[in-house]
Image (cartoon, helix red, strand yellow):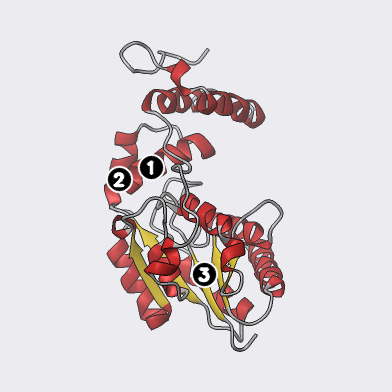
Amino acid sequence: MSTRKLILHLGAPKTGTTSLQRYMALNAGRLADRVEICTPTEGSPTREMGRSALLYSLDPTPKAEARLAAAIRAQREALSGPGVTLISHENLLGAVPGNGGTRVLYPHWQAILALLDEGFAPLRPQYAVYTREMTGWKASVHAQITVSDGYTAPLATYLADYADCGDWTGLETAMRAGLGDRLSFFRLEDETDAAHPGRQLLALAGLDAADCAALQPVSTRSNPRVAPAALEFIRRLNEMDLPQGARFKVVRLVTQNQALFANEGGSAPSKPV
């Protein structure tokens, strides 16, 4: 274990994380002799660790902290031998602005990373964050929290409410002050090959361009943004007093049949029925 290189890809959401994780999982077997890949598959310790980090950021109680610490220990115990391990979960920095009352860009990152450092000791993790042009990122985040978390405000209101939530430069500066060269920030815009995503992150794990080119490509974009008319339908649905289970069922119906929710002009129906 003492010779292992550990890389934690912390997100952020809506920076190509789903495509990257799909690509890494698709090629996990090809990479097994060089890099151990851990993504949030069903029942995996990576999924629980990311979920626990998100919940802790929304409600940083001792109980939530203990859950996160236990999830980190479980992930550490699942590491399998010497080499390089790359763990990827988009929620390891916590909740995005607008989710559960979060007002600023990752207010609890310090506490979460302290728990990660403690839980993986004596390993010293290297941390990687992907960013994206802020306005486009916020638009995608707005769509995500509208679909997933029942957010009710339109995009213009969201952009106004969170105009001062912080920016990537400020976050990187603050994180680098504590982590130094253990921190890498990558721009999604610098990923130029959609079929081979995450080259900057994989380079950190020791793979060069030729190594990446030899991997099996991903053929389609993962987790695309919901179409505007369908998103507006869901936003209006969120304003209604529906039980959570019923809302999830309708949202799934809408996202799976988005063309049905647009009028001739491309707008959403006036009211969910």
Comparing labels 3 and 1, the label whose residue is closer to the camera: 3
- Mark positioned earlier in the residue sequence (3 or 2): 3
The residue at the far bottom in this view is 2
User: Badge 3, how many Cα within 10 Å: few under 14, some, many 20+?
Assistant: many
User: Badge 2, how many Cα within 10 Å: few under 14, some, many 20+?
Assistant: few
Which residue is depicted at the point 59% across and 83% down? Answer: 4
Disc 3 residue type (three-letter): Leu
Q: Is residue 203 above or below residue 257?
A: below
Q: Are marks 1 and 2 in contact (CB under 8 Å)?
A: yes
Which residue is depicted at the point 43% across and 74% down? Answer: 204
State which quadrant residue 166 falls in: bottom left
What residue does disc 1 label? 140
Q: Is residue 267 above or below residue 2?
A: above
- How much space separates mark 1 and mark 2, taking CA atoms? 6 Å
Which numbered disc covers residue 83?
Answer: none
Image coordinates of residue 179 in percent, x first then y, are 42, 80
Disc 1 residue type (three-letter): Ser
What residue does disc 2 label? 136
Q: Is residue 262 above or below residue 68?
A: above
* Of residues 27 and 149, the one drawn nearer to the viewer in this rendering: 27
What residue does disc 3 label? 8
Image coordinates of residue 51 in percent, x first then y, are 61, 55
Which residue is depicted at the point 51% across and 22% down? Answer: 257
Which residue is depicted at the point 40% across and 53% down? Answer: 15
In terms of secondary structure, where does tag 1 sit?
helix
In terms of secondary structure, where does tag 3 sit?
strand
Disc 2 residue type (three-letter): Gly
* Of residues 4 and 71, the one drawn nearer to the viewer in this rendering: 4
- How much space separates mark 3 and mark 1, taking CA atoms? 23 Å
Looking at the rendering, in which quadrant would you find the N terminus?
bottom right
